[in-house]
Image: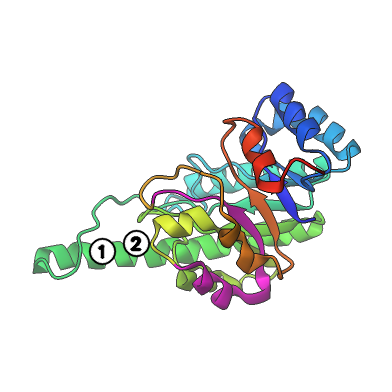
Amino acid sequence: MRLGFRPPKDPEGFLAYARALAGRYAFIEVPGSAAPHLEGVAREARGMGYRLTYHARYLDLYPGSPVPEIREASLRLLREDLERAARMGAFLVNVHAGNLPWTDYPPPGLSPAHEALREAEGRLRREYLERALEALAGLASLALDLGLKLTLENLPAPQEVPRTPEEMALFLAVPGLEFCLDLGHAQMAGQDPKGFLEALGSRLVHVHAHRNDGRFDLHLPPRPEDLKPFLDTPCTLLVELPPRGVGEYLALVGDQP
């Protein structure tokens, strides 16, 4: 069994989900934003037979920031997350690469002034990606030293990176780095998941399974056809739903363990 779930961020809710889904799901994602309060219940979940993945913090973190102090502060927090994940016994840590300080995204062909904006955004994006590559190389090296898999996730918004299979493929240059395909994020970005599979090959090892309306990150339950392309791969499949109720997770796998 390679299915996992995202629990609530409070210890009581975390354990309630773990007990209700025991025997049906194989692993639990520990959210980095709440990890200091969840170390005890995460150990208890491991005692129940679960494995652990860990989602590193990402709000206000910019591993590719053009400001050295911001970049280093972001990397310091991400290194702390890797070390905490290792202490908790997680086998995989998922990270975001952050986003650009940019808001103007005109479509092509409007005017020379609009094209100048597009060119400026393209330069900023390339520079951010170069710094993010360097940052992820250091994190991937630390993860290997700690006995962890480190995965990089695709993101949905125009200012975020990486967003496309082509941008994700740039990070193949980072030794030891593996990849997470977020199906809902790909849907919002207008990207076919097959493109990520083709671009990343065997280094795509983790999937965040959820869906949306193509505009908003609703984290609705995935459909069987969403999961089917990954059932014959070694990917771990995290069903990533908000804490609307454990029933959504039970409905995906049936009532019997």
Name which residue lies at 74% across and 67% down: 234
Residue under label 1, please give it: 120
- Label 1 Cα crowd, 10 Å radius (few <14 / some 14-19 / many 20+): few
Q: Which mark is residue 124?
A: 2
As drawn, 205 above or below 253:
below
Name which residue lies at 61% across and 68% down: 229
From the viewer's perspective, tell me whether residue 223 is left or right of residue 188.
Answer: right
Q: Which stretch appears magenta?
A: 192-213
Residue 64 appears in the rendering: no
- Label 2 Cα crowd, 10 Å radius (few <14 / some 14-19 / many 20+): some
Residue 147 is situated, as x and y percent measured from the top left of the image, at 82, 56
From the viewer's perspective, tell me whether residue 65 is left or right of residue 143.
Answer: left
Magenta stretch: includes residue 248: no
Name the kind of residue labelled 1 in the image: Ala
From the viewer's perspective, tell me whether residue 11 is left or right of residue 199.
Answer: right
From the viewer's perspective, tell me whether residue 129 is left or right of residue 49.
Answer: left
As drawn, 14 above or below 73:
above
Nearer-the-camera pick, 214 or 73: 214
Residue at the extreme top of the image, as rendered:
12
Q: Report which quarter residue 81 is drawn in.
A: top right
Residue 173 is situated, as x and y percent measured from the top left of the image, at 59, 74
Q: Which mark is residue 240?
A: none
Colouring: rainbow
Residue 190 is situated, as x and y percent measured from the top left of the image, at 38, 62
Name which residue lies at 63% across and 48% down: 239
Name which residue lies at 35% across and 56% down: 158
The reply to whether callout 2 and callout 1 are in contact (CB within 8 Å) is: yes
Mark 2 to mark 1 CA distance (whole Å): 6 Å
Residue at the extreme left of the image, as rendered:
111
